[in-house]
Image (cartoon, helix red, strand yellow):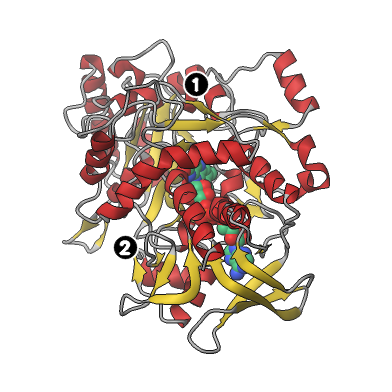
Amino acid sequence: MTGAEFDVVVLGTGAAGLTAALAAAEAGATVGIFDKADAVGGTTAISGGTVWMPLNPHMPPGSDDRQAALDYLESLSLGLIDPAAAETIVDEGPTTIAWLESVTDLRFEALSGFPDYHPENPGGRTGRSLDPALFSFDELGSWASMVVTGHRNPHVRLADIPIGGGTGILSDDVRAERERTDARGCGAGLVGPLLRALLDRGIEPMLNARATDLVVPDGRVVGVEVHRFGVSETVRARQGVVLATGGFEWDADLVRAFLRGPMTSPASPPTNTGDGLRMAMRVGADLGSMSEAWWVPTLEAPEDTAFGRPRSSLLLRERTLPRSIMVNRAGRRFTNEAANYNGFGGALHVLDPNRLEYANLPCWLVFDQGFVDRYGFHATPAGGPLPDWVLRAPDPASLAALLGVPGGALRATIDRWNVQAAALQDDDFGRGRSAYDLWMGGAADARGPEATIGPLDEGPFYAVEVHSGCLGTKGGPRTDLHGRVLDTHGAVVPGLYAAGNVAAATTGRAYGGAGGTLGPIFVFGRRAGVAAALD
Ligand SMILES: Cc1cc2nc3c(=O)[nH]c(=O)nc-3n(C[C@H](O)[C@H](O)[C@H](O)COP(=O)(O)OP(=O)(O)OC[C@H]3O[C@@H](n4cnc5c(N)ncnc54)[C@H](O)[C@@H]3O)c2cc1C
């Protein structure tokens, strides 16, 4: 292992690790950064790359204010957010964005019109979400092929596609130019410039390097054991080790032990197995938010693969478009299908106390031929034909038989939905009442409830199973505002820092809007890097 002693050692190359490493280097530290994967970027690289930041410098002046942002986060917190952490995000978010744009080639553009996930809550706004600009991977030289990939089309920004407010259509010229310069957006548009900035400072991530244990001779973390190609070596950290190893969603034992309900379909790369959490537990870290994840309903399409295995896809737009509903094992709707994905996790965890089973698992997305003709489905363009794994039947009763749900109930559910659709009013679950439902829903030309409400009245009828997934888990070692890990007595574990999904979420249960995980990660990743450098 080259240069096995650094001021600061960072474990993980997602947003948290890259940001902490850059901040530490900017503060004058020598930095070593390690990742167990064979590519840089973790979940961050395959993410939408959207960053939620109240009061960000790309919002029109006067369109946000500090108290509104704090009120909004508090309204989502169920009393669990640390007010000091919320203030740090709101107060340092704007300068963190400005800092990123000054020390890297990362540039953000406003996703104007994109509403917060609960825009009607106190302090809710539109325009707090930021989209990374395209970044040419040509700038990375040989490192271009060493960044995690997973997007079906890497050459788009979120703003280009329907869930970001775009049309999804690029002209041939634009597409060709982006391919020529290997210009990538979304998560790659974040990771590319952050990696470039580290390389410019002489910091090369060490890949295939799995941190296995902290070195703690006298109560202070002074290094880490790193396993690489069958050999273990001690990497010394003169000032601090920053855990940035992502969540524990791929470790079945940790998931079973801690998460509050079923989570069977993680959408992140499989290298997030809770290694940092276990290392922190071993040195006595206090833990927080352990039952929580960044929940998301997912689709498991056989044609989707990544990292050499089937891949879960986020089910976002399909469940918010008109002419689709979701039903549970009873053949009934059970929630506002167009609600934001993180909140949706709550609907999938409802327990039926009589039968002691999860009331809404399994569940299915049900849609009709009118849906397919207008919107396509998943990777299938409008008009179809749909792949064989999508269940289909000429009428609701026959579809119900395929799903194993009561036929009469599914028929009645669709009939009731169609009555409500005719009135453009979902009296059962309020779908279409929030500006968020309308943004994620229908066509750009529909901005009323018709953006998400429409009948299922053109057979055949289709169904796919929807799974309880997550973008990553939220629980881990508790930290102070400088990212210093705290032990079970509330004291700092000397020399140990944590940021990102490895740590207890700084927003508690709140998910403010698109980019609600990455925004706080940038703020606290930077703080952890600076604090470690100055330790
Ligand atoms: C499809 C998808 C889309 C998303 N879109 C968005 C979005 O638009 N906006 C948003 O805010 N959030 C989004 N998220 C969530 C967001 O991507 C994550 O919350 C965020 O990237 C987590 O960053 P991180 O640095 O904590 O972890 P990661 O990015 O997961 O990085 C952790 C890294 O640590 C490495 N590692 C693990 N164990 C070890 C070890 N023992 N030694 C060394 N390295 C190790 C891993 O290999 C990985 O590279 C999305 C998630 C998914 C799955």
Most extreme residue toward the bottom is 218
What kind of residue is marked 1?
Answer: Tyr
In which quadrant of the rendered view does residue 215 lie?
Answer: bottom right
Quarter of the rendering occupied by the N terminus = bottom right
Q: Which residue is mark 1?
A: 375
Residue 478 locus on image (x, y percent)? 37, 67
Q: How many marks?
A: 2
Q: Nearer the viewer, residue 288 or 437?
A: 288
Residue 321 locus on image (x, y percent)? 40, 25
Q: Is residue 266 visible?
A: no
Horizontally, is 266 left or right of 88 in the view? right
Q: Which residue is mark 2?
A: 260
Q: Nearer the viewer, residue 227 or 242?
A: 242
Query: Which of marks 2 and 1 precedes in the sequence?
Result: 2
Q: Nearer the viewer, residue 218 or 328?
A: 218
Residue at 38% across / 57% down in the picture?
505
Q: Secondary structure at mark 1?
A: helix
What kind of residue is marked 2?
Answer: Arg
Residue at 21% across / 51% down in the picture?
78
